[in-house]
Image (cartoon, rainbow, N blue to C red):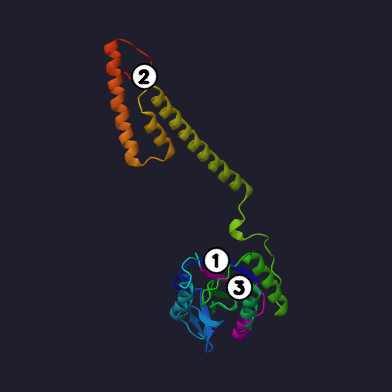
Amino acid sequence: MIAKITRGSRPGDIAAYLHGPGKANEHQFTKDHMRQRGGVVIGGNLGREGETDGARWAQDLRAAAHTREDITKPIWQVSLRCAPGDRKLSDQEWADAGQQFAEQMGYANNPWVMVRHGDDHVHIVASRVGETGEVWHARHDFRNAQRAATQLEKDYNLQQAPRQRTPQRERIPQQRQNERYRGQERALTEHRAEELRRALEIRARATAGMMPIEEFAKTLKRPRTAAEREAEARNLAQRAREQADRDRDRNRDRGHGYDR
């Protein structure tokens, strides 16, 4: 059994996905011996079994999540998929397995729902925030989900799926990692070089008497806005022209490069 986890903040979005037909109508369930498009609630602790529209259970999860506005991504979702060749679990078996999974993961007392999406897999959506504001932090959820899925395989006589040591989203080829780190290093180096160039340029102007020392200190302490950079460029151009005029008047060339 494979467990894949995602987190989000909008229960309505995941509800629309789980109960919609999906691309190429791959989302189907059986009801009254008839194949139906979309998903159907078969478990959870919200009493929504049999519903084929997720609007009401999404509202249940949304109400719980709103009790703690400080919690980011309060919606937790996991898909549980049997291996190819496994026997088909009944709705009741899946519901019992979902309850066992919820207890092992630690969110059993929070609002959660199970939606069947086909013969071989289901989705569980839970609010990390309980109805009274308590929070399930889902620490080490990937590792714990792997352990819980292994237990379900044993209890329901299913094939044992290979386990990943890290979530799939974190398994990046080493070459790609190295390229990403080199890119970050280059960007950081260029940023530091630009900051150093700017500091030295401002210090030189201050030393040459082109900028009061108080203004020099303020400029170093805070970042400049786009308007300030534009204004500074205009001021520098004006000061450069004035300096060039003075140099010509005094018939001196100090090599500052102002006289263009």
**Mark 2 or 3, nearer chain start:** 3
Q: Is residue 5 above or below residue 242?
A: below
x then y, percent, for residue 160? 71, 71
Q: Is residue 98 left or right of residue 130?
A: right
Please name whichever residue, 96 or 129, is drawn nearer the observer in this view of the structure.
Answer: 129
**Residue 233's spot in the image, x, y percent?**
32, 32
Q: Secondary structure at mark 1?
A: strand
Would you say the residues marked 2 and 1 are in contact, meaning their CB atoms lie under 8 Å apart? no
Task: Look at mark 3 in the image and give the residue it sits on.
Answer: 80
| Range of magenta residues | 74-95
Q: Percent from the top left, x then y, of residue 150?
A: 70, 72
Q: CA distance from mark 3 to mark 1?
A: 12 Å
Residue depicted at 38% across the width and 32% down the height? 214
Q: Is residue 258 magenta?
A: no
Structural distance between the alpha carbons of marks 2 and 3: 70 Å
Q: Gap in Å between the C-alphas at discs 2 and 1? A: 59 Å
Question: Quarter of the image containing the N terminus?
Answer: bottom right
Q: Earlier in the sequence, mark 3 or mark 1?
A: 1
Q: Is residue 13 above or below residue 170?
A: below
Query: Which image quadrant: the C terminus?
Result: top left
How many marks do you count on the picture?
Answer: 3
Q: Residue at x 53, y 75 (%)?
A: 130
